Image (tube, rainbow, N blue to C red):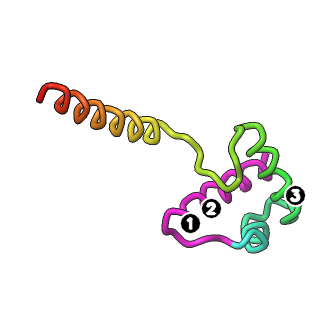
Amino acid sequence: MACISVSCFHLAAEQAARQGGSSLDLRDLAVISQCNCTPGDLERMERIIYSKLNVAQEGFPLTPLSFLRIYHELFLASGKFTSNMLE
């Protein structure tokens, strides 16, 4: 369980780093966490988590906020289309 939780923490930190945060070195995280996992174990667990969640490693995971942003853009576009039809 420790390996899974540290891997999930690293995945979340990497997502935050892509959005302007600072990144964590996996080797340092493995030592600091004292989870008795090697950096290789953590990388392998991250790949398993990504595959189970069906998320591309380079991509951003979909969240409820992502859905709301897409829906908002769709709503704005349909409003512009409707107002152009009425003119």
Determine whether 76 is above or below 56 in the image: above
Give the CA separation, mark 1 to mark 3: 21 Å
Q: Is residue 8 magenta?
A: yes
- N-term-proximal mark, 3 vs 2: 2
Q: Is residue 73 magenta?
A: no
Q: Quadrant of residue 68?
A: top left
Most common secondary structure along the magenta stretch: helix
Q: Which three-letter amino acid code belongs to the residue tagged 1?
A: Ala
Q: Which three-letter amino acid code belongs to the residue tagged 2?
A: Glu
Q: Residue at x 79, y 45 (%)?
A: 1
Residue occupied by mark 3: 41
User: Could you classify mark 1 by the number of other residues whose Cα lies within 10 Å: few (under 14), some (14-19), or many (20 or more)?
Assistant: few
Q: Out of 68 and 33, give the one closest to the viewer.
A: 68
> The residue tagged with tag 1: helix, strand or loop?
helix
Determine whether 70 is above or below 17 in the image: above
Residue occupied by mark 2: 14
Give the CA separation, mark 2 to mark 1: 5 Å
Q: Residue 62, image x and y in percent?
A: 55, 41
